[in-house]
Amino acid sequence: MDKRAKMKRIVLGVIATVAVGMVGAFAIVANQPGASNESAQSLSQVIESGETWDVAFAAWSGKPAPNFTVTDTDGAEHRLSDYRGRNVLVVFWATWCPACNVEIPHLIELRKQFDENDLAILAVSNETAEHLKQFVAAKGINYSVVPLGDSSLPEPYADVRSIPTSFFIDKQGNIKLAAVGLVSLEDSRAILKSER
């Protein structure tokens, strides 16, 4: 490798590290006690205030979430339609994704704040079950992690091209919002509590 290519790799590495650090710092500041006014926000207000994510799959907003069945790293089967009556958060992610790794503590805390009868969290990755199982144990992840494997998902999930991408599905089984990018704990709570 010549010096110029090596220098380029070093510069890109430094830029990526700084960017991840800035996102992490923002996430910490945004989740300080007293930083939330989520109870008074409508969904459109939450969308307008989102700084680290954008709306995705807007055409699916308000429509029934297509059903799918997947198996998590513990061997438990999850059928989306079985979660009717609960909010569901389906997150597409990967262990190698910096923004996804920043989002993990937010999801862990979200799992702690919402009873499992109120919220199901399914984190879907195309990585192997064994790799994910080790990662889950190392990070102390307390929500369901799903290796996609050879499973195929219906649209719009099959059309996810960027990660993290999150689908917030309401208690009636409709897609409330899809977001691409890092959704903070504060924003996730606000989305879950907001009305259309």
Image (cartoon, rainbow, N blue to C red):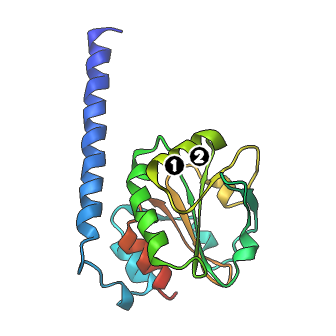
* In the image, residue 123 above or below residue 177: above
Front residue of 114/17: it is: 114
Q: Quadrant of residue 72?
A: bottom right
Query: How far apart are the alpha carbons under marks 1 and 2?
Result: 6 Å
**Is residue 162 visible to the viewer in this orientation of the structure?**
no
Q: Where is 11 relative to 7, above or below?
A: below
Residue at left 43%, top 87%?
42
Residue 12 point in image, percent of width and height: 30, 31
Residue 35 seen: yes
For residue 90, side relative to residue 188 (left or right) = right
Determine the residue positioned at 40% across, 45% down: 98
Q: Callout 2: helix, strand or loop? A: helix
**Within-10-Å neighbours for mark 2: few <14, some 14–19, many 20+:** some
Q: Secondary structure at mark 1?
A: helix
Above or below for 138 versus 46? above
Compared across the picture, whether 179 is left or right of 30 comes to: right
Q: Which residue is mark 2?
A: 133
User: Residue 67 at what x, y percent from top left?
Assistant: 76, 68
Q: Type of residue at label 2?
A: Lys
The numbered disc on residue 137 is 1
Q: Between residues 145 and 20, which one lies in front from this camera angle? A: 145
| Residue furthest bottom in the image | 40
Q: Which mark is residue 145?
A: none
Instruction: Give left or right: position of 80 versus 184.
Output: right
Q: Are marks 1 and 2 in contact (CB under 8 Å)?
A: yes
- Residue 170 x/y as whole percent: 60, 80
Looking at the image, is 46 positioned above or below residue 4? Answer: below
